[in-house]
Amino acid sequence: MIEQHELSMIYNATLLSDYDVMYEYDPGSRTFFSLVFDGQRIARKNKWEDSGDGVLPSELTIHEDDMDMFRMALSDKTIRESFKEGKTVSHMFLRDCRGTGQYRLFMYAFHYFEEMGRNRVLIMARDADREIL
């Protein structure tokens, strides 16, 4: 479990509750989790394995565009340095509204970190047009 106070130092610009979706990826085992935030802690909810062939399990609720962002983040030339330095990278990305042909601007934040000697990527996304109170 990832403690909220640890993440608050990383994401002090935007509260965790302001994000629409959160995932965690372990590139070593090609495993990823959907995450839930209960107001105090982030907990791993569901676990899936990335087959690497671009085909996702039918029960997987991750948005296709989010998976594309995962793969883009992991193909970064500076990924080793990102893990070493604990970098957080933000991207603005147009996201398909579930095949409607309409796109919305989403903000993605990737945080590269180590947990118990293993590299991890935390990915968070939110609708960039949604007002934050």
Image (spheres, rainbow, N blue to C red):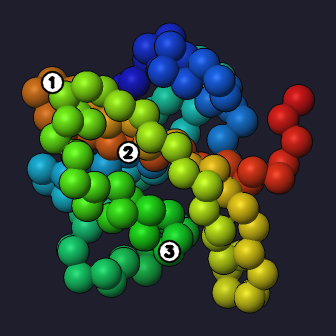
Q: CA distance from mark 1 to mark 2?
A: 15 Å
Residues 1 and 65: in front is 65
Asked whether the beta carbons under mark 2 and mark 3 sit within 8 Å of each other, the answer is no
In this rendering, position of residue 109 left or right of residue 47: right
- In the rendered image, residue 96, in percent from the top left (x then y), is placed at 66, 77
- In the rendered image, residue 124, in percent from the top left (x then y), is placed at 53, 45
Whether residue 39 is situated above or below residue 71 in the rendered picture: above
Q: Earlier in the sequence, mark 1 or mark 2?
A: 2
Image quadrant assignment for residue 51 = bottom left
Q: Earlier in the sequence, mark 2 or mark 3?
A: 2
* Picture residue at 23% right of the left edge, 46% below the top: 78
In this rendering, position of residue 4 left or right of residue 38: left
Residue with the mark numbered 3: 64
Asked whether the beta carbons under mark 1 and mark 3 sit within 8 Å of each other, the answer is no
* Picture residue at 20% right of the left edge, 36% below the top: 81
* Picture residue at 52% right of the left edge, 71% below the top: 65
- Residue type highlighted by circle 2: Glu
- In the rendered image, residue 29, in percent from the top left (x then y), is placed at 14, 53
Residues 50 and 125: in front is 125
Residue with the mark numbered 1: 116
Residue 44 seen in render: no
